[in-house]
Amino acid sequence: MSALLEAHDLAKAYGGVHAVRGVSLDVSPSEIVALIGPNGAGKSTCFNMLNGQIRPDAGTVRLDGRDITGWLPREVWRLGVGRTFQVAATFASMSVIENVQMALLSHAGRASRLWGLATRADRDRAEALLALVGMARQAERPSAELAYGDLKRLELAMALANNPRLLLMDEPTAGMSPRDRVELMALTAEIAREKNLGVLFTEHDMDVVFRHADRILVLSRGQLIAEGRPDEVRTNPEVQAIYLGEGLTYHSGVGS
Amino acid sequence: MQLFVVQLLSGLASAASLFLVASGLSLIFGVTRIVNFAHGAFFMLGAYLTFTLTDRFGGPLGFWGGMALAAVLVGLLGGLFEILLLRRIYRAPELFQLLATFGATLIVQDLVLLIWGPEDLLAPRAPGLSGAIDVLGKRVPSYDIFLILLGPLVLALLWLILHRTRWGMLVRAATQDRDMVAALGVNQKWLFTGVFALGTFLAGLGGALQAPREAVDHTMDLRVIVEIFVVVVIGGLGSIEGAFVAAILVSLLNAFGILILPKISLVLVFLLMAVVLVVRPRGLFGRREGAARMSGGAIMSVWKPLDRDGRIVASAVVVAAALAPLALGPYGLAVATEIAIFVLFAASLHLLVSVGGLPSFGHAAFLGLGSYGAALAVKMLGLPMAPALVAGPLLAALGAAVIGWFAVRLSGVYAAMLTLAFAQILWSIAFQWAPVTGGDNGLLGIWPASWAASAAHLYWLTLALVILAIGALRMIIFSPFGYALRAARDSDLRSEAIGVNRRDVQWRAFVIAGAGAGLAGALFAFLKGSVFPDTMGVSTSIDGLVMVLLGGVETVSGPIVGASVYKLLSIWLVSHTDYSKLVLGLVIIGLVLLFPKGIVGSFPLLHPRRVAPREKAAA
Amino acid sequence: MLRNGLNSLFALLAALMMFASARADDIKIGEINSYSGLPQFTEPYRKGWRLAVDEINAKGGVDGKKLVVISKDDGGKPADAVTAANELVSNEGVALLAGTFFSNVGLAVSDFAAQKKILFVAGEPLTDAITWSKGNRYTFRLRPSNYVQAAMLAEEAAKLPAKRWATIAPNYEYGQSAVAVFKKLLSAKRPDIEWVAEQWPPQGKIDAGSVLEAIDAAKPDAILNVEFGPDLVKLVREGNTRGTFQNRSVVSFLTGEPEYLDPLKTETPEGWIVTGYPWSDIKTPEHEAFLKAYQDTYHDYPRLGSVVGYSLMKAIAAILTKAGSTDTDKMIAAAEGVSFDGPFGPVTLRAIDHQSTMGAFVGKTALKDGKGVMVDATYHKGSGYLPSDEEVKKLRPQN
């Protein structure tokens, strides 16, 4: 299968500091890929270059063979990419179902229509999406009232509104309780498999990563230092070193 | 050479005075995010108190002591104002504090008249600094030199306070992220009070220092408030150094500008602000505002189109309004027509401010363009009333297209100030371009066609057009476009991520809002029979904001109620008392305290929302 | 200080009582002015017209009918003045409108009066447009216009040896036309005069130091000043410190009026040629009577506003007496050419352009006992300075 998402040699520097250097990765349809690394490794920068929020200094990004390097996020979205954010971004002044309807309206190209009640648009489809993420009963609630876990589910529903082929999820379980994390990622994985979606997500929670990821990419200081199946990555000494430390400070000189 | 030096010194002295007042505003806004409209009033109080204190206590000690005491008193008053009033409304929606400060300004304006009388007062000259020193053969006032030295001294002192004291560090931290500061256990309440007191102290000091230079009169606050806002914005909100640089820039440009273009002073400061904001959208030294972590205010209730009860009420209101000519005479109908016009004005502003989250301090520009468009159609093109009523909104929409294009590229108060700059530029064009606009003598003879000439007919025409326009605006609010507009406001990230082009959507909202205000303006021209530049003035724009805020910025019907109440109150008060501002200010502050979410917005507090049955079962 | 507030409160109550006691056969006069916007003018002005109304009513009123004045505030805004005018005409049923201060407000009410076909006697607005370029048959204006005051000052200015002139005027219609007319009339008398500099600070926002230095740099022999109010105070203080007015003649509009002269106190520049009101020095029987009555009633000296208010009501009483009715057309016919006696002597309302012949005092400023006064003042009748009838016909729309 050809890759859904391909990135070659991405690089980004901020005033002399190389946040990301020479990173290449790919995601295939129906594949769940995790991007991990310690703080400051450049995960967010890398991620944001893929979805168009940041323009890479060098390198290319391709979606289904099409060059989307430097495209705006809304242009990337239109090609079938769904997005969730580290801090759940939803429309606080709207109800749960209105949030989803907004995404659907935009997908249908009707978001600039000045007439017609928006709350009547695509209601069935919106309810179906909510049912998919288990939020059907809360459809009429103001989204600002939701518990954080539910907010993340809503986000997921919105990200799925445009029938995406690729889901980009930035720390999808950040800020959630352990039980919610497990539930949400399980749900996401299930949906991804059902709909043949490619998923690329960044994470800190290793339980989630190792349980659901098909492949893991490890970033350290802006560079990709390891890639492979979970069990390969787990036993990779370099990976262990950057996470657990090398103990150098305790080996040199003391007591020997 | 001689002229250059002398103008330089004169400009720097003006800059010092401007900086002192502006620094306080920059500090207050930087930390508390309050648009302190009352800053000019504190400046004025400082001047008045200085007059009284220096008048009573003679001698150098009496003079300087009096000045210092006046500034301290103003600072204390400011702190008191913050404790008694502002603290209660920090959790209110953004811009709501503007209402409270606006009410305070009105009260102070009439209060100084009551206490000190109507005459212009002249404070004594500063002892020891009453003369001039010789510079290159010209006499430069010693007081000017004193101010020039004082300016950087105050800047240095402020810098020291902000960078070398613990309190200052907290203030700087709060400027960047006040929610975090609160989360870290700092007593946010007293921090804000302290900042407000210091800011108003500086305003009072500015006023005190101006007292020996100019007459102390009751219009001082209005004359200075716009300029200090501009200086603060040019410098960058929250940046004291920025205020300093901006004050110098503005004053020197003016001092030298008038040598080449004597009439430039009218518009210079707004041109400068527009240029700066377009090139540097956060002012010269402004930093990116830390995103508010917690949205102000409690949970917003979801907007819904009118339910059956709501529709019945709305129909009843429309029917009652249509029957008004049976009960009201020509004057009452003229008042009702004016109220209807401003209801439309407020509703169009509401689309921008509430739905779009785009604060605007220059909305009166579109009202004015609508008025002038209609008036020019009648006077220059000789068109009858009906086409003129189309020409007005068209001109306004055109203006909105231009202004909006620039405004959507900025955010928050900067965007609002840019709209102010454009409005002031348009105002000065109307004011100066006498052959076309009649200058400040305006255009006269814009009377309705004979079929609409009677008070009742003009009223019905206005009512019909206003109801149609408001109906259209309401339809737009609940249309996909309206939702996209709100989406762009609620979450820039998310709306972009689902394909909404924020700038495009907001620009269109500007054009629609501009057209709505333009229609209001065109009707206004025919109601009054004349058009003057003050229709586009700052005070009209602020009135519009007050109407929207009063009604409730987070509701859909707020502007209708807010405009009706405010206009009715203003007209009634001006007709019945000489101190209408005092009463109006008190009423506004009362409303602010009683209805922290605006009049309409507070009703859910009185009638708790019924929880939907489905949720009850689920819970 | 609070005295002023209490005074105003009493004034308000008195007005309310006056309104409350209006009877069916009283003559109602609708009066509009910027009471909240310009109290330093309008408070003495209100005292003036109240004095006149009381005097007229004490003598039995007009044809046995009492005059009742219903007074409204316009807040200094033309749109609000139209609202007030509407209220007076529609709700109160006044026989005529009177008052206003600002030129743009005066014009708005004048246009309203023409539309509603009601008589309007404007008191203070100075713009020439109100009787000329935008004149209409329903509007009359009491105070000597911009043109007349400029002509009076130009006459005095022509006597000065000064050849290089600079002007400082507020940047709006009043300032612009004052300078334009002054320049035209003075240059006509003295073609040798050079206009070397002009400054146009925005009204209320004068940067006096910079403006004065810009003027000084052109080395004028004389300066024309049109600034008034707080701007004048600032200008004078700065000018005194910088010595801009030394060895220069200064001609200044309105500065001799107590409203603008009194705040200057010890800063009062000496020797400025000004128009104004030397209330303590006028030795005519009309003025002495007026002065005594005013001081006895209010324990305060009159300002120019007091004279305007007083004269306004005297003019209206004269119109009503001559017309013998409150029918608008009859009142207009009566007003054209009517004469009455004011504190400055007899005044006529001209038929040709509805402008009164009221004049102004021209004199010099001086400092006496720490207060500014006007000295060497002579009264100039308005009629002597208005242009010829042919010129006026061209300036006014013929309707």
Image (tube, coloured by chain):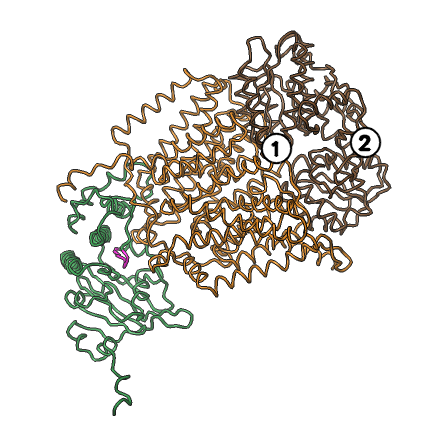
Callout 2 crowding tier (Cα within 10 Å): few <14, some 14–19, many ≥20: many
Q: Amino acid at mark 1?
A: Leu
- Position above or below: C377 against B297: above
Subunit bearing disc 1: C
Asked if both marks, 1 and 2, belong to the same chain, the answer given is yes
Is A113 on the left-hand or right-hand side of A26? right
Point out residue B575 in the picture as x, y percentages from the top left corner.
52, 25
Q: Nearer the viewer, residue A56 or B30?
A: B30
Q: Nearer the viewer, residue B606 or A158?
A: B606
Residue matched to label 1: C38
Q: Nearer the viewer, residue B425 or B134?
A: B134
Query: Farthest residue toward the bottom?
Result: A256
Q: Quadrant of the C terminus of chain A?
A: bottom left
**What hue does chain A carry in this figure?**
green
Sequence order check: which comes first, mark 1 or mark 2?
1
Residue C245: give x, y in percent of width and height.
78, 46
Residue B388 is at least partly visible in this image: no
Disc on res. C377:
2
Disc 2 on helix, strand or loop? Answer: strand
Q: Nearer the viewer, residue B241 or C146?
A: B241
For mark 2, name the chain.
C
Q: Quick check: marks 1 and 2 in contact, CB under 8 Å?
A: no
* Side of C103 relative to B611 (left or right): right
Residue B372 has which mark? none
Please state the extent of the stretch shown in magenta in the rendering.
Answer: A80-87
Q: Amino acid at mark 2?
A: Ala
Task: Find residue C172 and report its image quarter.
Answer: top right
A17 to the left or right of B609: right
Q: Colour of chain B?
A: orange
Q: Residue at x 73, y 16 (%)?
A: C340
Q: Give the letter of the brown chain.
A: C
